[in-house]
Amino acid sequence: MPVFQVIFNEISAAEISQLPTLEQLEVLSEFQVRPEDLDGIEENDADAPFGHIKRDGSDLYRYRASDVRIYFAVSDDHQSVIVHRVLSKGTFQDFLFRANLPVGEDEALAESKQFWELIEEGERARRV
């Protein structure tokens, strides 16, 4: 089964490097994305490892690994995934608390201007 190549940008690489080494290894070993993982993602399935967020015709995906959320997009050539942001438990909980989101995680993020600003910053960052 083919697996997407994973590409981090400067921001997401720095974010994952902030995790303890063993947690980094665990998250990266879990984060193996195949095209079929992204097909038919159930909307509002809070327990699913993958989530799908849409905005203005753009597709963004979320991968949940323990207390870490990885937000990524599929490249135009469909050969790789580009990781825009890696948010750990502390940063993610703080973000949700500040945004005061009363609905499901992915649904709420799709409507959050601050979240999309984080993602857009990651999209503009240099890939490493």
Image (spheres, rainbow, N blue to C red):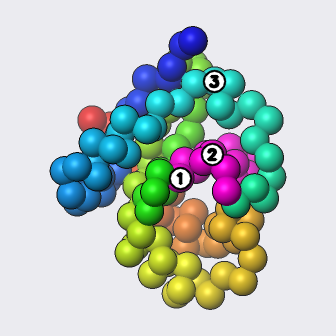
Mark number, residue 50 = 2
Query: What segment is highlighted magenta in the picture?
Result: 47-64
**Three-letter code for the amino acid on which mark 2 is drawn:** Phe
Q: Is residue 61 magenta?
A: yes
Left or right of 57? Residue 92 is left
The residues tagged by marks 1 and 2 sit, at their Cα atoms, a distance apart of 6 Å
**Residue in view at x 55 percent, y 73 percent:** 114
Q: For the N terminus, give its image quadrant.
A: top right
Residue 74 position within the rendered picture, expressed as x and y whole percent measured from the top left: 57, 32
Q: Nearer the viewer, mark 1 or mark 3?
A: 1
Q: Earlier in the sequence, mark 1 or mark 3?
A: 3
Residue 71 left/right relative to 86: right
Identity of the residue drawn at 51% across and 19% down: 3
Residue visible at 42% across and 69% down?
89
Residue 39 position within the rendered picture, expressed as x and y whole percent measured from the top left: 74, 31
Distance from Cα at disc 3 to Cα at disc 2 = 12 Å
Q: Which residue is mark 3?
A: 35
Q: Earlier in the sequence, mark 1 or mark 2?
A: 2
